[in-house]
Amino acid sequence: MRYHIKEGNHYKSNIGLKLHSGLTGINFSFIFDSSCWYKKINKDSLDINKLFGLSYGPHHKNSIRLGWVPDFENIGKIQLWSYVYNKGKRTFNHICDCNISDNYLVSFKVENNQLTIFIVGNEFCSIFKENFEIPKFKIGYFLYPYFGGDNPAPHDIAIDINLI
C-alpha cells in the first residue's frame, strides 16, 4: 500500500487504528520513493521519521519501529534506525543504509526478551538485536508512517509498505 504524507503534515490522515493482541513478530516490505530524500532544513531534520512498527499499549511506553532519515551527504541514500520504547525508555540505533526505489524485506521478532530486526535488500542483509520485553498487557496497535519529530514533511512524501 502506498502511504502519502502531504507537505506540512506528520502522517497520512484517515489511516485508522488497527489493533493486534500480542504479536511477537511481523514481516513487511517497503520501498522509499524519491520524495523521501530531502535536504537538511535545520537541526530538527536529524529527527528520526517512523516507517512502521507495533505498539504494546501506548506507543511511547512499549513499541518497536523501524525509523529513517535521509543520508544528507549522499543523495538517494536513506539511513535506517531502530526506534524502540521499552518500559517508557526510548532508544534508537543506526542499523544500515538503503537506496531509494529499492525493495527491502524486514522481519521483527521478539523472543526471550530480545528484539531482532532482520533487513534484506538487493545488495545486503543486516541483523540488529536489542533487549525488549513484551509487557504482560499485550494488546497494541500497528504504527504507520510518521514524519518527524518536530519538523513536518517539507514536501509530499510517498512510501510503499506491504505486510507479508
Image (cartoon, helix red, strand yellow):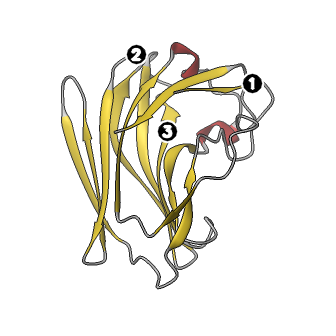
Q: Which residue is mark 1?
A: 6
Seen in the picture, residue 30 relative to 137 is either above or below; the reply is above
Q: Amino acid at mark 1?
A: Lys
Q: Residue at x 75, y 24 (%)?
A: 6
Residue beneath disc 3: 68
Up/down of 76 relative to 135, above or below? above
Spatial CA distance of label 3 from label 1 is 17 Å
Note whether 46 is above or below 26 in the view shown: above
Q: Quadrant of the C terminus?
A: top left
Badge 3 amino acid:
Trp
From the image, state whether disc 3 or disc 1 is nearer to you: 1
| Residue 117 locus on image (x, y percent) | 30, 53
Disc with the residue nearer the chain's start (1 vs 2) = 1
Q: Which residue is mark 2?
A: 101
Give how far apart the Cα atoms at labels 1 and 2 are.
19 Å
**Residue 116: image location, x then y, percent:** 27, 59
User: Does 38 sit left or right of 132 as displayed?
Assistant: right
Identify the image quadrant of residue 44. top right
